Every structure is written in structure tokens, then in C-alpha cells.
Image (tube, grey):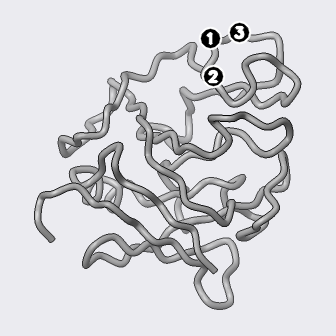
Amino acid sequence: MSRKSLKIIDVRARPGHASQGQLMAGNMTLRCALGKGGITAFKREGDGATPLTRMRLLYGFKRPDKNIKGASSLQLHPLRTNDGWCEVSNDRNYNRKVRIPYGASHETMWRKDDLYDICIVMDWNIRPRRRARGSAIFFHLARPGHTPTEGCIALSRRDMDRLLPYLSNRTTIRVLR
């Protein structure tokens, strides 16, 4: 695979494992974690499913205190200890980054489990934002054993480090059946 950024990354569930997937990027096939609800065409807030759709990579975050390898043409902002992501569908900041403490329910981005050491925002329910259609659908790091996410797509740290140099804001992830 050349150092050019990838245009398309395909993700499918592994046969017999709805919450684990295969991510195909150029000539790489990588194991990934998917939502505990599998893949759905009818994404709803709190269903734990990964949306069946195309999502462009917009930008990301990285923990400045971690050794993030590989330059990327995808814009990666330093993550701060007070970064959060609003998940309340009737809040004006639904599915947006917020500063914590924040009055409405939110995802804490600076995590002890390292899942968001590298966290890429995809364009699911960003513009237009639709109430209750799902928030915080990220491309981030997986737990050991690729246990299910809440709807995100997650790679091991090693695989994310390998893939990061090929990602840009022109890269689209297609979640397929």
C-alpha cells in the first residue's frame, strides 16, 4: 500500500460474531470491534449498534501524554482532561464536543481505559443532527479482546498505529452487511 491516503475503508461483521468485524483498508484486513447491538440500518440513541452507512472521517483527538505514532494528514487535536461529548438528544449541544463539567449527560473523552487515546470523529449524525439518531459514533481504540463498543468502530492500538498514516478527511468508512 502506498503512503497515499485511503479513500474507502470497508467494515463488515465477522461471520457468527455480530459485535466483531473485519476492517479492509487497502491491502490490510484488520480485526475490529463493533457495537454490542451489531450493525443496524435503523440507528437510535442507546441501541448499542453500529450504523449501516458511509461515514467520512472528519477530525480526531489524541492524548498528548501518550506516544501516538505515525503522522496523519487527518487533523488530530490534543485531547484535554475536561473534554466531553454530549449525548442528550434534546440538548443544544447534542452530538458535539463540550467542556466538562457539563449539565447534561455526556461521554468523558479523557478516559482511564485508554480507548480515546486516539479518537476519530466520523460524520454520523453531525449535519444535520437528528434527535435520538445516535451520538458519539467514533473510530477509536479497542479494549483487549475486541469486546463490543456502544456503536463505534474500534481497532487495537497496534493496528490503529499502522492505519493512522493513511487516514485523511477524504477517507470514508463504509459499514456493510
Where does label 1 land, which residue?
99
Q: Are marks 3 and 1 in contact (CB under 8 Å)?
A: no
User: What kind of residue is marked 2?
Assistant: Gly
Q: Which mark is residue 101?
A: 3
Q: Nearer the viewer, mark 3 or mark 1?
A: 1
- For the N terminus, the image quarter is bottom left
What distance separates the C-alpha of mark 3 from that of mark 1?
A: 6 Å
Q: Secondary structure at mark 1?
A: strand
The vertical placement of 50 against 101, above or below, is: below
Q: Residue furthest front?
A: 128
Mark 1 vs 2, N-terminal side = 2
Vertical placement of residue 139 versus 113, above or below? below
Amino acid bearing label 1? Arg
- Residue 58: x and y, percent? 44, 39
Which residue lies under the disc numbered 2?
84
Vertical placement of residue 127 versus 102, above or below:
below
Indicate the secondary structure of the residue bearing disc 3: loop
Badge 1 vs badge 2, beta-carbon distance below 8 Å: yes
> Going 75% across and 26% down the picture, which residue do you hit?
94
Based on the displayed image, in which of its 4 quarters is residue 29 positioned?
Answer: bottom left
Q: Quadrant of residue 162?
A: bottom left
Who's the residue at 22% across and 55% down the image? 5
Reading the chain from its start, which is encountered first: label 3 or label 2?
Answer: 2
- Given residues 92 and 155, the one toward you in this image is 92
Quadrant containing the C terminus in the rendered view = bottom right
Measure how far apart labels 1 and 2 are at the Cα level: 6 Å
Asked if the residues shown at circle 3 and circle 2 are in contact, with their CB atoms under 8 angstroms apart, the answer is no
Residue 81 at x, y = what percent? 52, 16
Specify whether 137 is left or right of 166. right
Task: Count neighbours of disc 2 (C-alpha within 10 A) and say few if under 14, some if 14 to 19, many if 20 or more.
Answer: many
The vertical placement of 49 against 117, above or below, is below
